Image: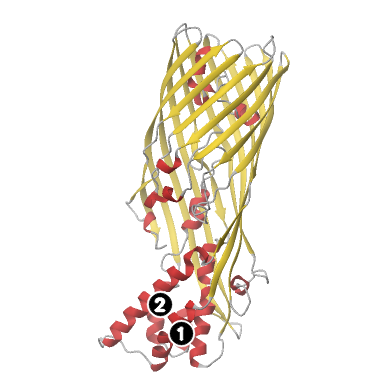
Amino acid sequence: MRKLTLAAALLLCASAHAGGYLTNTNQSVAFLRNPARDAAIGIDGAYFNPAGIGFLSRGWHLSLNIESAYQTREITSSFGSVNNRSLFALGQGNPSDGVKTFKGKAQAPVFPTLDLAAVYNKWFFSAHFGITGGGGKCAYNNGLGSFESQVAMLPVIVNTASNAITGQNAAAGYSYNSYVRGRQYYIGGQLNAGYKINSKLNLSLGVRAVYATTNYYGYVRDMKVITTTGQAVDLPTLLTQFNMPTLAKGVSNLTGDRNLNCDQSGWGITPILGIDWKSGRWNLAAKWELKTRLRLKNKSGENTSGLEEFDDGKTIPADLPTILTGGIQYTALNDSSLRFNVGAHWFRDKAATQYKHRENKLGGDGFEFLGGVEWDVKKWATVSLGAQYTNYGLGKGDFLNNISFVTDSWSLGFGAKFQIRKNMAINVAYFKTFYLGFDKHMKDYNDLKANLGGQLSEKLTALGKAAAAGQIHLTPTEQTVMSKLPTALGTFNTAGTDHFDRTNDVFGVSLDINF
């Protein structure tokens, strides 16, 4: 238990709402009511379709957007068994069947974006500001199964020792206290310049500067064994009571409190190329965002978590992927009042370097398909509806675990635009994501037996060598327990299952002004 998995919750705190697992594409309220914006002609093209800005009317265009996003993440876990009883059932306050749900809540009550454009005869320019990654806070009030499974082994360890001595169990359960909170904001400022090659073709070139700022705070404290007499005792104290003082001292750091408070920051540059071709009722557009090389510098006030990823002064790779998008818009009626949109996104996530090359566990790159329709029901009112399917390239689920919680999804958005003045409009929208649940079955829950067994074996081997060298003294009881503990632990069932699920609701309102 040297490396207690606080990170299991920390990396879940990224609050992306749409797009790849590293990126946010919900960059306008117009997107919320029709996510297929890749070939749409509008002021939010400053992000979605920079080359399409050239087909706006001459002059200046401005859009101010506010979104509010609310998410829940749930992992329903079951783990191990002893005497046909789930090990999670031994936890104080846990369900008797040992099936436990770990809940996290993430919210971004104010998620702002801004678009600005200036269109001239041949040249056009645009700017976009938004939170292009992360974008919220997330808290897990009771930790996660990947950590609790390690605490759940305390009764197993104690009973193995007590049975070797007295032939009876000494532990009836366990208790602990855990909390994790995370915040991630990847703030992007983008500038684009474009040129009208002719009346049908526009090209654009842009650059986005991304500044990342994060904070991770969490702790795991008060790990106790609940004895058969109802007492809550820490492991070293209990081992001492069993006349194993040397062993108690040797394993004291395995169950000590773990704390983390780490800030990270860094920045990167994203080059962006765009093209838009418009002819008659058709408009076709594409955008290519190159990979953003991002390195985050740690500033840790405290890190006793055992997780070197959060060591003070360390630099962590956190690239944002190359993104290729394309879309088609078709205007169905002569008065241009009905428009159909389709689009596709390709996220080269497997080529975006992460800490210890975590990206290699992905089954493939992420991709999305999008579609939508807009209808000007009146000169002053437009209604729209759209859908999006997102596939994260999870493959067989090797990437999907407590540390990386994303599942494929369907999203539905709808809303309206109201022209309140000749040069001023308001957008309102709602965007709902329906995640596809995922069950991950593991013969050894999060490699617990391998990791915990290895750590205990390492500790016991070191104690044995120290005793052989005369540096420490082992009591006969300690010698007996140390000889039986590794073998006995290897016989326990550590199979487990995690069921992953999420919810996501986003509301938005924006103001568009032409001047």
- Tell me how many marks there are: 2
2 or 1: tag closer to the N-terminus: 1
Report crowding for label 2: few under 14, some 14 to 19, many 20 or more residues within 10 A (C-alpha).
some
- Residue 38 x, y percent position in the rendering: 55, 25
* On screen, residue 55 above or below 452: above
SS label for mark 1: helix
Q: Residues within 10 Å of mark 1 (few under 14, many from 20)?
A: many
Return the x and y of residue 296 as percentages of the image width and height.
Answer: 37, 45
**Rounded to the nearest whole Å, what is the CA distance between mark 2 and mark 1?**
10 Å
- Please tell me which residue is depicted at 63% across the width and 16% down the height of the picture: 424
Q: Are marks 2 and 1 in contact (CB under 8 Å)?
A: yes
Residue 349, horizontal then vertical, whole percent: 45, 41
Q: What numbered label is drawn on residue 34?
A: none
Residue that label 1 marks: 239
Image quarter of the C terminus: top right
Q: Amino acid at mark 1?
A: Leu
What residue is pinned by disc 2?
251
Q: Quadrant of the N terminus?
A: bottom left
Q: Is residue 256 visible?
A: no
